[in-house]
Image (spheres, rainbow, N blue to C red):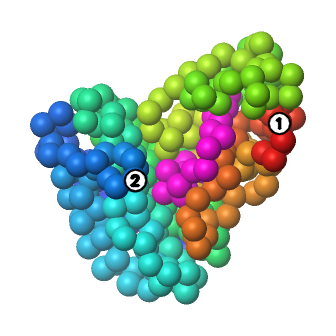
Amino acid sequence: MPAADLPLLIDAARRAGRIACSFTGPDAQRWDKPGDAGPVTEADLAVNDMLTDVLRSARPDYGWLSEETEDTTARLDADTVFIIDPIDGTRSFVEGSKTWAHSIAVAEGGTITAAAVYLPMLDKLYTAALGQGAALNDSPLTVSANDRMQDCSVLVTKPAMQPHHWRAGVPPALKRGHRPSLAYRLALVGEGRFDGMLTLRDSWEWDIAAGALIVSEAGGTITDRAGLPLRFNNPHPTLNGVIAATPVVHSGLHAALRPPSA
């Protein structure tokens, strides 16, 4: 029930922003996760605690998948699941940058039905509900009108630009951009500020879930790197990379990439 869930996600996202902004990024206590899994701060944990309380109290029958909560198989028995990244772009938060985000989504039967991506330092709230469109601060979103690969702008990390990932080398007309937060990268595609976003590494569902719906509801195309539809709440909660773009740019990127097994 995306229409009923979205106001809950919006309220939770704004609460998350107030909590996170009460910490000063560089001064927030931080730890490195085991296995070189990146940093976590006291702000991440405080936001996660609030989201757990607010969202699970409101929807006790929903499953739970969050970057900062130990995962269990219990969520696999739930028809509907929250998929949460309390702070996407923790390194950015620690550095004092403004481009970190709260990413909050609901998945039903493997499909994202409601989503919010909030950047409190920029006062940018991206939202989407399945079949109801996407918005930025209540203004409707539409992906870029770019209908060709020439001079397309794509958010992508440097490692994905290595020639061996591409059938004939990196397309020469591709203009590269970057943002630390995967959720924000996807939201920027939905906003139409970039023509596409690409990541070739296995991606955690909590980084992708909310942004994926924003892209698709804004008229974009989003798949894994092999061109297959994204499905969420997997037993191992990762996706095989992501290609998100305008329909034409998505087709061009997918055709230009080497198959994952190549």
Give me the residue at 24% from left, 29% from top.
96
Give me the residue at 87% from left, 35% from top.
255
Q: Residue furthest front?
A: 35
Range covered by the magenta-colored residues: 191-212
Q: Is residue 103 above or below residue 157?
A: below
Element type at mark 1: loop
Q: Is residue 197 magenta?
A: yes
Q: Nearer the viewer, residue 167 or 191?
A: 167
Q: Nearer the viewer, residue 46 or 202?
A: 202
Give me the residue at 56% from left, 40% from top.
186
Q: Nearer the viewer, mark 2 or mark 1?
A: 2
Q: Is residue 189 above or below residue 127?
A: above
How many circles with numbers are drawn on the protein?
2
In the rendered structure, which disc, 2 or 1, sits on the residue that comes first in sequence? 2
- Residue carrying label 2: 35
Element type at mark 2: helix
Q: Residues within 10 Å of mark 1 (few under 14, many from 20)?
A: some
- Give how far apart the Cα atoms at labels 2 and 1 are: 29 Å
Quadrant where the N terminus sits is bottom right
- Residue carrying label 1: 258
- Does residue 126 appear in the picture of this structure? yes
The percent position of residue 58, horizontal first and vertical second, equals: 34, 78
Decide if residue 256 is on the left or right side of residue 192. right
- Does residue 248 appear in the picture of this structure? no
- The three-letter amino acid code for the residue at tag 1 is Arg
